[in-house]
Image: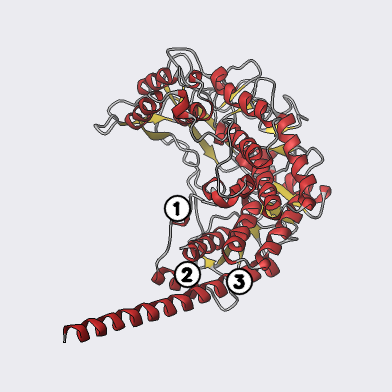
Amino acid sequence: MKVKILFISLLLFVQSNALFAQQNGVLVGTAQAAMMRATKYMVDSVSIHGGYDRVYLSDLSRRWGELEAYKTQIWMTYGLTPDMGNTFLNAFDVTGNEYYYRAAEKVANAIIWGQLPCGGWNYIIDFAGDRSLKEWYKTIGINAWGWDEYNHYYGNATFKNATTTKAAQFLLRLYLEKLDPQFKPALDKAIDFIIKSQYPLGGWPQRAPQKIKAQFRFGVGENPAYFDHYTDYTSDYIFNDDLTWENIKFLIECYITLGEERFLDHIQRGMNFYLLAQQGNPQGGWAQQYDMDLKPAHGRQYEPASLSPGDTYRICELLMKFYKYTGDRKYLSRIPDAIQWLKSCCLPGSENENGTCTNPVFVEIGSNKAIYAHRKGTGVNHGHYWVDYSDSNPLLHYGAKETLNFKQLEDEYKKIDALSPEEATRNSPLAVGKFNGNQTPQSFFKTDPKQWHYNDNSYPEANIETIPNDSEVREIISSLDSKNRWLSKHEWISHPYSVSKTGEESNTALLSTEGGAQIKDSSNQEYISTLVYMKNMNLLINYLKK
């Protein structure tokens, strides 16, 4: 009897597993079909020659990147178009369907079309050419209040927001996918540009090659002490937005996958530049940008020459990484000085038992006082920015304070400091040694996806480690509309460019309050968002991987 019961139980277990596998297989197939339908809509109906913008009205009559774009334009900043290509390659890697690879090729063709003669990229690629792009800058760009770099047409490439680096990285990944030589010339051109743009001391400018010097002067506002002789800053040394690190990281990826010794000197000089730029005690931190004399310099109108606790914290983390790359203890030597300075910047009453405290975004050089940016007005012609010591009504589109965890930073420093050079460099991508991976280094972008996976802060649930359950997968699939679109609402947009009867041009910046807080569309207007597409695609891809 017991044997019979055991047999029946085992049979039911096997049947249950078979049914679950069958149901799971059906859902996998349904997910793959939904991914294909959504992608075909984006490729066939939304893209412009393979490129994309951030968000579109559902009828495609208007579109935006960081600002409103013409129908002939695609956006490159924050890796927007390249990351659509990465999403297609993610889908290709998990499904093997060549359609996704061909979609990624179309992205590459758009990127290569927009590659500048210097080898880099601007924020925008305009398929209508130079005259259309200059008209955009003369109307939409110049009137975008608070978007300083768009107020001028530079005619060169930018490293800001990893614009050039993300494009080059995507070309590297696509080239490595099949070692297709058609992508190598554009990739080599981009690599050469990044290398040639590096200053002898190891840092990089925001824009290159340099075409403009001291041409622009912004309004000095209410505090001329900070903004006197406020000239263009894009040829300065830049740490802001991880610009220097993004370039170093890309060159490390090139060294791993292309194997050329020439990258090492540029990587080393880039890492060393962080040491050169650290300030002396008692303010042993870093600024967001530096002039050619290595003195902290201003950036945009609301970025005064000052020291940055947030950047200092992140640079300390990078220096520990550099020690693990090289085994050279010089990268650790002044981290304690930086931590000591960070502690001195804690705002009164903000320290907590868990080791955190609140720091200002900007700290005045010399006095170590917190300084804050503000703005008032309605636009470029009737508004201005200024800084002072008051934290009342701070600038909301940038931030005034941030919480930093000093205990966590100190604990990590002690842990890394205790490692011998041999222990620290055990897994270094720069250390000399035999390659021990199961595949060749050319498979880097498949075996180490955290290096390239799209993860926009707007959708933190879509990070590489998020695997949706069956119910969530069904919800994603069912949210496709009849045209195979994942529609969204309440996007961040702008008013159209216009000129009043009195000749006043409108503010073309994305909508915000006078203080800079975002104003999103509160209506029921539906949008097509590439960010939503990438979020849903990568969630489904993660599901298929499991």
Q: Nearer the viewer, residue 146 or 108?
A: 108
Q: Nearer the viewer, residue 244 or 224?
A: 244
Task: Give the number of callouts.
Answer: 3
Q: Is residue 286 left or right of residue 229?
A: left
Asked if residue 408 shows in the view, the reply is: yes
Vertical placement of residue 434 versus 456, above or below: above
Dot 2 alpha-carbon crowd within 10 angstroms: few under 14, some 14 to 19, many 20 or more: some
Displayed quadrant of residue 410? top left
* Badge number at residue 441: none
**Alpha carbons under labels 3 and 1: distance apart:** 24 Å
Dot 1 alpha-carbon crowd within 10 angstroms: few under 14, some 14 to 19, many 20 or more: few
Q: Nearer the viewer, residue 201 or 444?
A: 444
Q: Please, what is the three-letter code of the amino acid marked with disc 2? A: Ile
Q: Which residue is under mark 1?
A: 460
Q: Residue at x 64, y 66 (%)?
A: 42
**Alpha carbons under labels 2 and 3: distance apart:** 13 Å
List x then y, in percent, for residue 218: 64, 29
Vertical placement of residue 529 versus 201, above or below: below
Q: Residue at x 72, y 47 (%)?
A: 139
Q: Give the mark, 2 or 1, whose residue is nearer the N terminus.
A: 1
Secondary structure of the residue carrying numbered label 3: helix
Q: Which residue is under mark 3?
A: 36
Image quarter where the N terminus lies is bottom left
* Badge number at residue 476: 2
